[in-house]
Amino acid sequence: MRLSSITIDADGSPSGYIAWYNHHTGKPGFKVLRPPTRNEKYGIQRMEMLAIYFAIVKNQRQIGILASSRKKKQFIVNIRSDSKTCIEQLQGISKVRDSVLQRICMSIRRILDKMPYVIIFNHLERGRNQAGLLLDQKRRKEIEKNLIRQCQKQYYNVSGLMMEHYSFATA
């Protein structure tokens, strides 16, 4: 029996962004959520788990289409994350202690129970996580935008002062 599979990377950021990347379609996905408060005990882990949840939910239709086209083959969905703790919790190796994380895990389990194919969770290195690389790229672009805004603001302030000084000196 031949196996068919789809791989989806997921990652969450403490700044409130989550991302996923479907390797089969080559399509990334982003979602902005309310960021966790600073030093929140399970904040980053919640974002990572939400990234996995949304990666499954937002790709559910695509997974269903692919799985139905492979009728005689077993279909495997490989969800990858660089959060080893989240992966171990979803694999049932580690216990989920936070009540919010428990609710997210239960939501993921309910979705998976309805899917007629095999879903596996795997850990991968941060540098190989396409969703994490997308988040890094998005963060760099935002930093660049902020720097440009600051430079423009300073330029207009300085050029305004120069114009005032020039008009005062010529009067």
Image: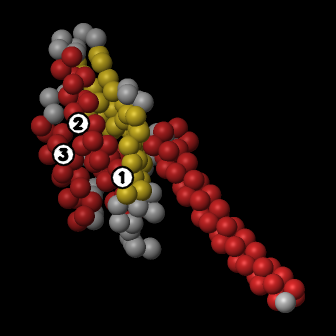
Judged by depth in the image, the label closer to the viewer, 1 or 2, is 1
Please state the horizontal and vertical placement of residue 5, each as a whole percent of the image. Answer: 32, 23
The amino acid pointed to by label 2 is: Gln
Inspect the image, locate mark 1, and give the three-letter code of the amino acid beneath it: Lys
Displayed quadrant of residue 60: top left
Identity of the residue drawn at 31% across and 53% down:
50
In the rendered view of the protein, which quadrant contains the C terminus?
A: bottom right
Question: Reading the chain from its start, which is encountered first: label 3 or label 2?
Answer: 2
Q: What's the residue at 27%, 60% (across, down)?
A: 101
Q: Nearer the viewer, mark 3 or mark 2?
A: 2
Disc 2 designates what residue?
Answer: 60
The answer to which quarter of the image holds residue 36 is: bottom left
Point out the frontmost of discs 3 and 1: 1
Question: Which of the 4 image quarters holds residue 23?
Answer: top left
Residue at screen point 24% across, 9% down: 1
Please, is residue 9 above or below residue 46 in the view? Answer: above
Relative horizontal placement of residue 115, taking residue 75 as reference (left or right): left
Position of residue 130 in the picture relative to residue 33 (left or right): right
Callout 2 secondary element: helix
